[in-house]
Image (cartoon, rainbow, N blue to C red):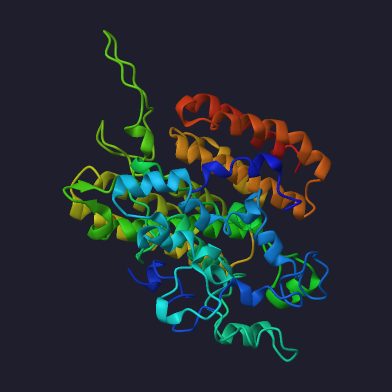
């Protein structure tokens, strides 16, 4: 956490919030009958429960950082307790769920919601989002993974989830930080109306906030060197694949006779309304959305970012993805069947990009930053959600440049003021101004570009 800028950690409030091939069911949890043994089984002082991170191979203080009471690193451990707080009680009461602490609609993401017959003796729902939510049910690999003959390959064979793989990590995180088809892992518009935070996702930032390990020589030898640009880009691709895959299913894309508004841009409807002699439009036309005037747009924050990824890192697939994106928005103004069909096509193109990015090395962060802030992409920053993704991306990619030694820590510190202005432009969704944001983002990107 020491290398995560404070400006990013303070924006945590912005974030809280088919088949295996489509990314709806992550490989880590498909057809798994292993037992969930609980956080306590990992907490021994010779395992991950030390008070100080001075282990010979891994830090061994992972439980302490997971339980940190006041910072983002401890958010997963606090997830179950949040259900018993005032906000949790209010949401559950409004939706008629009974106690939030026992409601499956909440437990799917606020705890490791293992099937009852797969819970070990030390398993506790009250542990919140525990080790096995991300690393997988430990019944098979727990007794083996620390033994001297064990290797990372043998641990994976026993059921440990390969979180070093960007696609796998994205799918695991998206289960709760966007939604999945499993019980309790989809935040509906009704939940947000009752008080649940809006959902947003950026894989590299989430990874940094929840990183409980050091990327040292041992880690690199066993799992390879992480690449922030690749992680961020694949996160965007998997988010588009997940959102379109869920939207294409009527059981998720519709809510009674209405569409499920969770998928749409919040501020197209939630805005101030005034009646006067002259109209005052509260939105800008968006060149990436060929939709009828007045239609609520699909929340395309990840689609915009993936368009930039395609232009910068996969130009051979860029036109196909852009065409599928425009066709999807256009279909939203036609009928439900056309929209679902176009969503499947767009998700397929996102999958092509994800697989292509996974197969290649990392990308040039300077190029991606320039593409995000360039005219073709920045013209699409007409809405709050997409703009939040853009400033997080610039921040993520700047950190990648520092870690790779292409920009010094001192030079990056000099650019933080520009990035802070861009963050300030999206600090309050009610005061968001597209022109002001685009100007601030462009200034930050130009400052970074001058350091090449």
298 shown above or below 126: above
383 shown above or below 32: above
Is residue 80 toward the left or the right of residue 323 in the image?
right
The foreground one among 261 and 97 is 97
In the picture as drawn, the residue positioned furthest to the bottom comes out as 149
Residue 153, image x and y in percent? 64, 85
The foreground one among 220 and 133 is 133
Residue 286, image x and y in percent? 38, 34
Residue at 47% in and 31% down? 429
In the picture as drawn, the residue positioned furthest to the top comes out as 277
Residue at 71% in and 39% down? 448
Is residue 145 toward the left or the right of residue 339 in the image?
right
Note whether residue 317 is visible.
Answer: no
Is residue 301 toward the left or the right of residue 415 in the image?
left
The foreground one among 372 and 83 is 83
Residue 433, image x and y in percent? 49, 25
Residue at 53% in and 62% down? 128
Residue 350, image x and y in percent? 43, 59
Query: How many labels, in total?
Result: 0
Locate the C terminus and report the quarter of the image it occupies. Answer: top right
Is residue 280 toward the left or the right of residue 119 in the image?
left
Note whether residue 242 is visible.
Answer: yes
What is the quadrant of residue 141 in the picture?
A: bottom right
What is the quadrant of residue 291 in the picture?
A: top left
């Amino acid at each position: 956490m020491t290398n995560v800028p404070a400006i990013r950690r303070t924006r945590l409030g912005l974030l809280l919030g088919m088949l295996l091939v489509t990314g709806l069911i992550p490989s880590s949890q498909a057809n798994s009958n292993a037992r969930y043994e609980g956080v306590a089984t990992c907490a021994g002082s010779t395992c991950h429960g030390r008070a100080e991170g001075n282990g010979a191979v891994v830090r061994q203080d992972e439980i302490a950082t997971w339980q940190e009471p006041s910072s983002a690193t401890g958010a997963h451990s606090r997830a179950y307790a949040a259900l018993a707080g005032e906000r949790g009680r209010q949401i559950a009461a409004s939706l008629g769920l009974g106690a939030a602490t026992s409601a499956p609609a909440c437990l799917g993401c606020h705890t490791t919601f293992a099937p009852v017959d797969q819970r070990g003796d030390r398993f506790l729902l009250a542990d919140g989002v525990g080790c096995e939510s991300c690393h997988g049910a430990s019944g098979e690999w727990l007794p083996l993974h620390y033994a001297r003959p064990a290797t990372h390959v043998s641990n994976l064979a026993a059921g440990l989830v390969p979180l070093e793989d960007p696609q796998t990590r994205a799918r695991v995180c998206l289960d709760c930080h966007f939604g999945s088809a499993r019980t309790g892992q989809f935040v509906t518009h009704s939940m947000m109306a009752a008080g649940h935070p809006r959902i947003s996702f950026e894989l590299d930032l989430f990874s940094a906030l929840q990183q409980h390990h050091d990327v040292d020589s041992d880690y690199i030898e066993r799992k390879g060197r992480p690449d922030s640009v690749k992680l961020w880009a694949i996160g965007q691709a998997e988010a588009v694949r997940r959102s379109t895959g869920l939207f294409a299913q009527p059981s998720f894309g519709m809510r009674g006779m209405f569409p499920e508004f969770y998928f749409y841009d919040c501020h197209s409807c939630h805005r101030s309304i005034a009646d006067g002699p002259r109209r005052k439009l509260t939105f800008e036309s968006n060149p990436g959305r060929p939709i009828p005037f007045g239609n609520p747009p699909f929340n395309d924050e990840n689609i915009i970012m993936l368009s930039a990824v395609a232009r910068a890192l996969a130009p051979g697939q860029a036109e196909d993805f852009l065409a599928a994106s425009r066709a999807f928005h256009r279909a939203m103004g036609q009928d439900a069947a056309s929209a679902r069909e176009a969503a499947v096509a767009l998700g397929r193109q996102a999958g092509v990009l994800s697989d292509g990015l996974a197969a290649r090395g990392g990308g040039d962060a300077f190029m991606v930053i320039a593409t995000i802030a360039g005219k073709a992409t920045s013209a699409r920053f007409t809405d709050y959600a997409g703009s939040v993704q853009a400033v997080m991306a610039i921040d993520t990619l700047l950190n990648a440049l520092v870690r790779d030694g292409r920009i010094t820590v001192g030079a990056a510190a000099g650019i933080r003021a520009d990035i802070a202005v861009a963050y300030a432009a999206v600090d309050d969704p009610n005061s968001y101004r597209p022109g002001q944001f685009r100007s601030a983002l462009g200034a930050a990107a130009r400052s970074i570009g001058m350091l090449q």
